[in-house]
Image: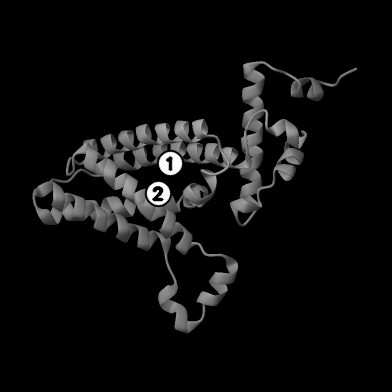
Amino acid sequence: MTDEKDSFKRARSDEQKGERREEILEAAQALLLESETERELSLNDLARRVGMAKSNLYRYFESREAILLELLRREWTGWLVDFEETLRCHERVPLVNDAARHAFLDKLAAMLAKSFAARPFLGRLSAILPTVLEHNVEAQTVFDFKRDAVEFFRRVAALLYETAPLLPPRRYEELLHLSLTALVGAWSFGHPSPEVRAVLHRPELASMRRDFERDFTRHVSLLARALLAESDC
């Protein structure tokens, strides 16, 4: 007689496949949160965590990187929900002069930095997007992810424009793309390995210590001011 769990494993309905994908993603995130780096995620460990053969994982995801890419997509979706709420709570102020406009852009940069700092799993995955997540996946998988990213940035740009029409939507969109490249670097340098952290405690290396939230705020603020200056020309 076949038990219920084995029967579920062999199921082929779209609903059961969706449930299985969810189980795999949840297990992968749990394993990642238990580890120092994403490179420690093992498909063998993941298969054991979900109670299935490693070969069966490939029925749902083409590779380890495809799993990470899907987790990143979900993290960005969750971030947007939180950031929309932050903007809704933002007090509207008249942006009648350069000082007020610059002050708003500085505040926007700080809000973005704080929102990312509050979601370390998002930061971890975003930091390795170009070097890890977009490798060992099929072209269609990358295309689907990039296409969704384009729409995502457009949505966030429109939201920022509605909040403060300082920049046209296309400029806000450019700011977001440039901010993502800054995020990759700022997160990596702001969250070094334990070995590097130990070395950076030496007084002579104090200038090499980086703080993610501070550095990312600075990056975005300067980028936003530069784009505003270009728009005013």
Q: In the rendered view, would you say 57 is above or below 37?
A: above
Q: Which mark is residue 115?
A: 2
Query: What amino acid is found at the position of numbered circle 2 in the picture?
Result: Ser
Residue 116 picture location, percent across and down: 42, 50
Q: Is residue 120 visible?
A: no
Residue 119 picture location, percent across and down: 48, 49
Marks 2 & 1, CB-CB < 8 Å contact: yes
Residue 143 picture location, percent across and down: 45, 33
Towards the viewer: 105 or 85: 105
Nearer-N-terminus badge (2/1) = 1
Q: Which mark is residue 182?
A: none
Instruction: Report which quarter residue 4 is drawn in.
Output: top right
Q: On the picture, is 194 further left or further right than 140?
A: right
Q: On the picture, is 9 further left or further right than 141?
A: right
Query: What amino acid is found at the position of numbered circle 1 in the picture?
Result: Trp
Q: On the picture, is 161 further left or further right than 144?
A: left
Q: On the picture, is 139 further left or further right than 20?
A: left
Cα–Cα span, label 2 and label 1:
8 Å
Q: Residue at x 65, y 22 (%)?
A: 17
Color theme of the render = one colour
